[in-house]
Image (cartoon, helix red, strand yellow):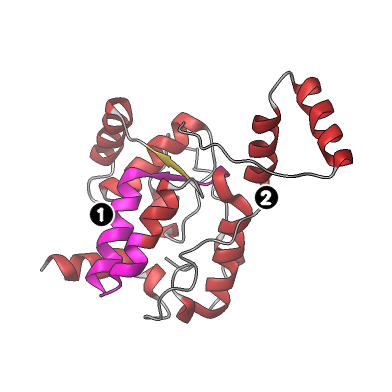
Amino acid sequence: MSAVNRSEGRRHKFAAEMLERLGRDLVVPWPVLVEVDLLLRGRGHSDAATTFSEACRDGYHRLEHCGTEDLSYALALGARYSDSGVDLPDLSVMSIARRLGGSILTWDFRHFRSVVPRRGTSWKLAVDEHQLPAP
Amino acid sequence: MATVRRTISLPPAIDKRLEREAKRRKSSVSAVIADIVGQQPAALPYVGMIEDDPDLSLRVEEVLARLAK
């Protein structure tokens, strides 16, 4: 979202450069694509929503399906953290990161720090809190 | 993955390098070109398309929840 939204200033530039550098190494889970589409359309940015989907279709990033095993893991993890407010798109990101062994690119540190695979472990995040620029 | 056919012209020296690289990789020239181009950072078409709340990316869940009401 930061990469799409130029009002985010330095954070926008940081995100855009990072996504351009990652290119096809960046995995976009299907639930995240849907969430981005909903958010952008809900704010009146249907052109940007379509352009983002087209970029995923055209291979700028790697679109990743969320299969039954991913969903099972997401549901089990969500059940363990039912009071946290973590939603299915976030849980699907965690499931796919677990399956592919990659790090997670998110600004949602609250959920991705508190919902962990096992006690004493954590998700590997591509950006830490102190690295995220203010707008 | 679907492919398209395209005729391109190359300087002979580059063509030779491509042939050598394809042989080394035991691959086709087309695959080598696709791989090299695919590794280059590409300008993303959606970057900077909107002007909205400066904290929009930090408020995704809140905004989505409001939209659902």
Q: Quick one: label 2, few (<14), some, or many (20+) residues within 10 Å?
A: few
Predominant secondary structure in magenta?
A: helix
Q: Is residue A103 left or right of residue A5?
A: right
Where does label 1 land, which residue?
Answer: A85
**Looking at numbered disc 1 in the image, what kind of residue is underneath it?**
Gly
Secondary structure state at the residue bearing disc 2 = loop
Residue at the farthest left position: B69
The residue under the point 60% across, 50% down is: A22
Which residues fall within the magenta stretch?
A: A25-50
The residue tagged 2 is B40
At a point 49% along the width and 45% down the height, the residue shown is A59
Estimate how packed mark 1 is, as few (under 14), some (14 to 19) or many (20 or more) residues with alpha carbons within 10 Å: few
The residue drawn where x is 46% and y is 81% is: A7
Chain of the residue displaying label 1: A
Q: Is residue A26 magenta?
A: yes
| Type of amino acid under label 2 | Gln
Residue A63 position, x and y percent, is 42, 42
Between A18 and A122, which is closer to the camera in this rendering?
A18
